[in-house]
Image (spheres, helix red, strand yellow):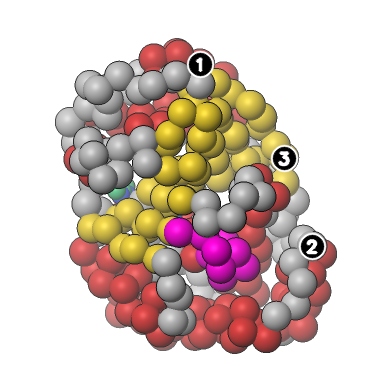
Amino acid sequence: MWTSFLEQVAALGIARDEAQVAAFRKFHDTLLAENQYLNLTALSTTEGVQSKHFLDSLSGLPLLPDMPNLRVIDVGAGAGFPGIPLRIVRPDLHLTLLEATRKKTDFLRRLVEELSLSGVTVVWGRAEMVAHDPAHRERYDVALARAVAPLPTLLELLLPFCRLDGLCVAWKGPKGPDEAVAAERALGLLGGRLREVRPVHIPGDSGARFLIVVEKVGPTPDKYPRRPGMPAKRPL
Ligand code: SAH
């Protein structure tokens, strides 16, 4: 079961590394064990976790700039996707996992400890609040999110974290291209520019997947994000 996963990871151009293999196994074991009472993921099979969580998260690897010690934030990280798989294969990343639900941040802290991941910070809070904290605002090279909100809403949560010339990457399903069109106004208001809607194929997953890449070309006005709930209630 792990052999084909490791072949698929290798196909992404990631050299095999025993410590990383062990980290994925431990992540899988911890996730499925804690899922029994925490309800962290709808997937309960090893193949499901490998394909729809690990490989899907890793599909964004080629989009991470090649410079060392990149500062990355994963907004609405849930059980750690896509941030943790990317951190496993890019140990130089400085990763912040932002998550609004306490039981999930508790899980993430246990996970980071269990996997002995350095350079990972877990923050409990809502993006609408944390993005106004000077310790986080416009402090990241890359802001990531998967399965958090439709793109116009999501960009209001992501772009404030990005530095000028930084990137936002959103993991999307079949509606990705339509969401990119719908986000045109939000992009203009928030200082973003669409760079790419990249189709990706995930081994073991038949559904259409897209990575939406947005560049930060101008500062995000201070009023964004609006107060908690507003980005979703009245998308830009
Ligand atoms: N990214 C993970 C989890 C997706 S579920 C994955 O792909 O598996 C969406 C998560 O985003 C939930 O855990 C929810 O608590 C969190 N979330 C939603 N809105 C948020 C906000 N405004 N700020 C921080 N976290 C948020």
**Residue at position x 77%, y 83% in the image:** 3
Q: Is residue 87 magenta?
A: yes
Decide if residue 226 is on the left or right side of residue 56.
left
Instruction: Give coordinates of residue 49: x percent, y percent.
Output: 57, 71
Q: SS class of the residue under badge 2?
A: loop
- Alpha carbons under labels 3 and 2: distance apart: 18 Å
Label 3 crowding class (10 Å Cα cut-off): few <14, some 14-19, many 20+?
some
Residue mark closest to the camera, 2 vs 1: 2
Q: SS class of the residue under badge 3?
A: strand
Q: Give residue 25's quadrant in the image.
A: bottom right
214 or 234: which is nearer to us? 214
Q: SS class of the residue under badge 1?
A: helix
Labels 1 and 3: the sequence-earlier one: 1
Decide if residue 139 is on the left or right side of residue 49.
left
Label 2 crowding class (10 Å Cα cut-off): few <14, some 14-19, many 20+?
few
Q: Give residue 107's quadrant in the image.
A: bottom left
Decide if residue 160 is on the left or right side of residue 223.
right
Give residue 199's mark. 3
Against 224, is 229 above or below?
A: below
In contact (CB < 8 Å): disc 2 and disc 1: no
Q: In what quadrant of the picture does the N terminus appear?
A: bottom right
- Alpha carbons under labels 1 and 3: distance apart: 19 Å
Q: Identify the amino acid type marked 2.
A: Gly
Question: Is residue 56 visible from the viewing direction of this image?
Answer: no
- Alpha carbons under labels 2 and 1: distance apart: 33 Å
**Numbered range of the magenta stretch:** 85-94
Q: Please give the residue where the numbered disc 2 appears in the rendered image.
A: 13
Q: Identify the amino acid type marked 1.
A: Glu
Labels 2 and 1: the sequence-earlier one: 2
